[in-house]
Image (cartoon, rainbow, N blue to C red):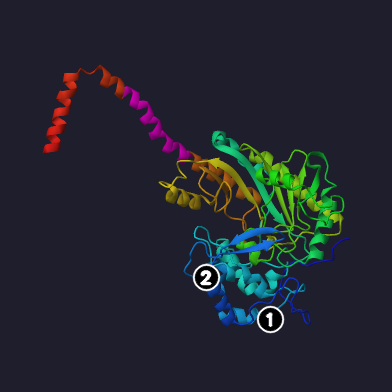
Amino acid sequence: MGCGSSKSPGKYVPNVDIPARSEPPHEFYGSWEKIEAAKKEFLEKEPYEIDINGLKVKLHHNSGKQEKHSSCMTNHLTKEVYEQLKDRVTKFGVTLDKCIKTGIENPGHPAIKTVGMSAGDMESYAAFADIFDPVIEERHDGYKKNANHPSDMNVSKIKDPAIVDANYVISTRVRSGRNVADIPFPPSCNKEERRRLEDIVVKALLKLDGELKGDYFPLAGSDSYAAKPGGMTTEEEEKLRTDHFLFQEPDSTLLISGAMHREWPDARGIFHNNAKNALVWVNEEDHLRVISMQSGPDIKQVFTRFADLCNAVEKVVKEEGCSFAHSKHLGYILTCPSNLGTGLRASMMVKLPLLGSDEHKVRFKQLATDLGIQIRGSGGVDSAFTGVFDLSNSARLGKSEVQLINVMIDGVAKLIEEEKKLEKPTEEKKEEKPAEEEKKEEQPAEEEKKEDKPAEEEKKD
């Protein structure tokens, strides 16, 4: 079961007589008045609970108590733009309503700038370019609609990771997403298309050999993969999740608004090699999420494995008659505009208990921003303070893979230096204390009284 041909998104050509997709629903608003009403509804919406195939999920669309919508999308969506684009559909029936739904239903985040859009297929970026282009420009530091995205996977150009103090680094990982061009992306695909994607990519992944040889494990409860009916056990799934190998259940309002929880957990799973340092997630936010990881700071080794995995996966996917969604302008085309280009997030899990504390967190955030580094808690964006942070490149588009990794290396090294500076006063204090106590023990009691007296007199004055 292969793929049809699919062109890179260029100029939009109207798809005459193609209706809006109904599974999942793609029509929600239809007028600017309904857009404004929906935004108001989700600003004020109280927390609620939904059931996803037995999984209870509590949702709150405005937990940050935003007073107004602040995503990139809502910054650029006007009545004129909406009226101009609202009746367009892609060849798969994707609509503007579908693409902006995540931003209408989620006002924003208090700590990070959210995009507020997701693409339903490759053509979405062309059909709705009048809103996607300014959103991309804002999110990617002025990246213009006529720019071309560079790529460079030459590991020899990566800086020596020895500049990063290994004593502070727990682990390193590199990840990126990939979508198959001629299948709707996870927000828009139906059950049959999702299963078709799983079938294509799993056949491809099982052809990997050498260091990358491994097996595919569907999520517990998935009956889509004939070789493992019912998927892995619940215990196996939780172990993979606890060990940070597997994605979470769809417990985010962004994923729910994007309808990425439908038929959960059907046709979702993970491929990993025997060493569990090369992973491929199937049918999460994108069709594929490709990950290389290991303990310590050796980013060169991690990236080499990542590049080998990406190349091997692309080769075997092509052998199945498919290709990845890609263009000269946008690079690899993914569901969220924030991940366009390389789609690459190179990160290190780093111990910064002082710099990351409440006392220094404002300076920490500013330093990271200046260095082009994105900060996440050890368990994700909203996780509680543990003194451990996931530090990664914040840019994705307009810079090559090697450039982004070097930004991450330099940034992490600098932030560790700042942590060390904060440690010095603490260490000096510890060293000074015994010396002061020793001096005090040697001093006669009468002299102590004499020294105390001026202090008392000074207090009186």
Q: Main secondary structure of the magenta part?
A: helix
Secondary structure at badge 1 equals loop
Pointer 1: residues within 10 angstroms few (<14), some, or many (20+)?
Answer: some
Q: Which residue is mark 2?
A: 43
* Left-right relation of 370 to 201: left
Query: What segment carries the magenta color?
Result: 417-435
Say which amino acid is labelled 1.
Answer: Asp
* Left-right relation of 350 to 301: left
Q: Alpha-carbon distance for marks 2 and 1?
A: 26 Å
Q: Residue at x 84, y 63 (%)?
A: 3
Q: Which residue is mark 1?
A: 87
* Left-right relation of 159 to 228: left
Residue 335 visible somewhere in the drawing = no
* Left-right relation of 356 to 208: left
Q: Residue at x 30, y 20 (%)?
A: 438
Q: Residue at x 48, y 41 (%)?
A: 353
Say which amino acid is labelled 2.
Answer: Leu
Query: In front of the other: label 2 or label 1?
Result: 2
Q: Is residue 423 magenta?
A: yes
Pick the front one: 282 or 409:
282
What is the quadrant of residue 343 in the picture? bottom right
What is the quadrant of residue 18 in the picture? bottom right
Q: Position of residue 112 (x, y in %)?
A: 52, 58
Residue 445 visible somewhere in the drawing = yes
Q: Residue at x 81, y 60 (%)?
A: 195
